[in-house]
Amino acid sequence: MAAVERYRIALAGNPNVGKTTLFNAMTGMHQHVGNFPGVTVERRSGRATRDGVELEVVDLPGTYSLTAYSLDEVVAREYIVEERPDVVVQVVDATNLERNLYLTTQLMELGVRVVIALNMADLVDARGDFIDTVRMREFLEIPVVRTTAVEGAGVEELIATVIAEARLGPHHEHEIGYGEALEVSIADLERILARDPDIERRYRLRWAAVKLLEGDERVLEGLVGSPVEADVRSFLAGVDQVEVEAIMADKRYEAINAVLPHVCSRCVPRMTASDMIDRVLMNRYLGIPIFLALMWGAFELTFTLATPFSTAIDMGFAWMVDAVNANMEPAWLASLLGDGVIGGVGFVIVFVPNIFILFLLISFLEDSGYLARAAFIMDRLMYKLGLHGKSFIPMLMGFGCNVPAIMATRVIEDRRDRIISIIVTPFISCGARLPIYVLFAGAFFGRQAGAVIFSLYVLGIAAAVLSAKLLRRTVLRGRPSAFIMELPPYRLPTLRSSARHMWEHGSMYLRKAGSVILLGALVMWALASYPAGVEYGSSESYAGMVGRAIAPALAPLGLDWRIAVALLFGLVAKEIVVSSLGVLYGAGSGDGASLSDGLQADSGLHPLNAYGAMAFTLLYMPCIATVAVIRKETGSWKWTLFALAYGLALAWTVAFAIFQGGTLLGFGR
Amino acid sequence: MMTAMMSRNRPKMAFALLAGKLYVAGAFLEAVAAAGIARGAARLLLVPGDPMGAFVLAVIGAIFLYGAYELRSGLDEGVAYLYVGIALALIFGMIYLLALGASAADAALTGDVYDPLGGMRPGLYLAVVPLAGGLAWRDRFDIKGIRL
Ligand SMILES: Nc1nc2c(ncn2[C@@H]2O[C@H](COP(=O)(O)OP(=O)(O)OP(=O)(O)O)[C@@H](O)[C@H]2O)c(=O)[nH]1
């Protein structure tokens, strides 16, 4: 006879939800009553056999939570942690979802397989309620089966679902998120705990970290004698555990209350505005289209609203260049000021309005609570694509600047998940790349500029996501871990806090313009002016020589030496691509023509290769600051170099495909 | 009771249906114009050929239609789609209005000729309909506390 397929099942649930009744219905007469080891808590176990699969079912004591405050809770929890049943069936009183789901959030955290038996389904029907088990499964990533234990209804389906769940390999999970500050503490604590392999074997690290932060004495006792005990204690000394416990409980209820209106029509006495907005924005089919529409709207506004401001700044600088050229002696000084300083820095300042508006809009979306929803909407997709759900927020931050985004991947515990996120985050288009798009799209795409810029952001996201999938399949095999969901209620963002965000990020950009970018522009100016006697910015200048040296590599992309030099200097900071072009094209013409006119006139660019150039700039290589932070966060030169080489290869391939493919299709000039 | 609820929701349902149809029609025209078909007729209706604009209109239209569908099935929560649809339609109307203002300001700066009709688009003028709805049900939109 073949080996019997055997699984161990535990029934958990709040008191009085019908656990014992369900246990009887599942196991029939095959029962055994004893005690849990060491305590006088009754332990009932029984057996159920279906199609040659044997289930050993244990009825755990009824508990509201899994803290260590009562003997019943400790017994239930120790059983799950120590005995590791294959599946925990949580029996839920469907007439009281909110309180019952609190236990669910804790079971999710324990990292066990959970199946929900939505018991008392008869009472739900009797009061005319409806619970959407499919939607519930989507939100919790837990299978849900309706049962009426007293009638035995749904019991067979429950058993079949339990067997299917036990057979299934690792799959996607959701967990409750506790807010950025606590998430960082959790990840830090996990890293300390992970140093003791014994702990890693015994506990799920995230769960242990959460419990320790909540001040759980039992888990702390479990660390006695461990080499990391002292470190854990000193880490916890800086934490107000009573406050943390309260915050965590709030966050669990916050998530439950965000889920309830989606799954149950009578669970909430009256839908709040937040619930109503959520119904629409998180609609199964409309959620992602709405997200895309809103993002597109943000970029459209970024481009159009900034135009008059940019024009005014541009005109101001053009006037200054004219004034300098007309009145300044000697000529080289006029050129240094006009072409180098004003041309280089000025053309970057022109894009400050775009950057400010983009940051304002992103913080609107973030402060309103929408971005957390967007993360949730995208999570399933992300998981399918091999990305960790947690990497969505760092990626969104990447729209501002990649450096803090890469640092934000610290909330991802798993090293492989984290390295994948770090490698792909630079493909997310940061604020510094925006001036390049605005310049090129404005010069070559006219009214479609907004859509073109949007498409580049989409391209960046696609590159990140597809690269993650590729990496997951090849060099960094494994499965992404659970998604940490946070669903804060919607709030109307205040102009004040959004404006403060905007200023924090935007002013950083201004400071950069006054330092790195100015320096880059001066170096560029020197390279464009010398050796002495050459025509400014010509191919005989040093800049020209450097450009011509690398130009062959870019020729298949339809880009000439001037773009090549600009891209090379853009490695320092991506804005320098624009300022270099400003030095080479814009002010050089001397008649106050704007940079985009200069580009249109004689760069050999047309819409197709301009688009290729934008795509190349998006992907080719992160700026120096980002490279430094990649090195720091991966702790490895190998991965840093890999990230650089990979980005460069991808950029070249994509730009090549755009230019050559477009030419074949007849879009070339 | 059921019929009382439905008659209470009837005006909302009719409104959601109308707004939904208008937006979907706008989306269709914009998509057609973007594909280069019937450009002349499209220009007459002030519809530019803009695929992303068409997409946005289609999303808003779908929200309205879904709301109408839920209200018709007697689901009171369908109003959520109506209100959020109105809010999104107004947000996008505002985006286009700001764009229009910005290009007027830009034209004033550069001295270019300014063609206000050139910036017209369904996302802007169709927003009059949700605006009327928003005004009719404005007590349901509480700006400070987000109440709907
Ligand atoms: N209407 C209805 N009543 C049920 C259902 N399941 C259980 N009950 C009733 O709920 C009560 C509690 O059931 P138990 O099985 O004792 O609940 P328990 O969770 O084991 O309770 P503790 O052992 O105290 O934790 C009993 O009176 C059951 O008859 C159900 O599906 N529908």
Image: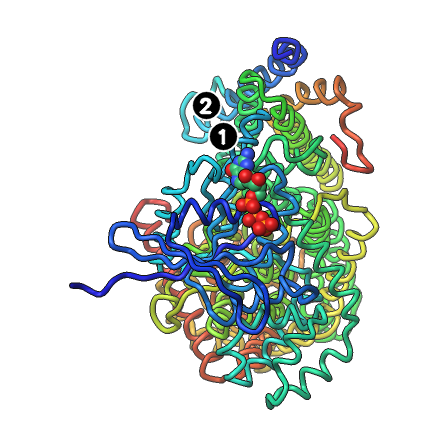
Q: Quadrant of ligand 1?
A: top right
Residue at screen point 80% across, 31% down = B142
Q: Residue furthest left?
A: A1
Q: Is residue A307 left or right of residue A23?
A: right
Residue type at mark 1 is Gly
Tag in front: 2 or 1: 1
Q: Which of the colour schemes (rainbow, by chain, secondary structure, one colour) is used?
A: rainbow
Residue A268, visible in the rendered structure:
yes
Q: Quadrant of residue A342?
A: bottom right
Q: Position of residue A271 (x, y in %)?
A: 69, 32
| Subunit bearing disc 2 | B
Q: Which residue is mark 2?
A: B39
Q: Which residue is mark 1?
A: B49
Q: Position of residue A571 (x, y in %)?
A: 55, 73
Using the image as rendered, state which of residue A168 and residue A54 is in the foreground. Answer: A54
- SS for tag 2? helix
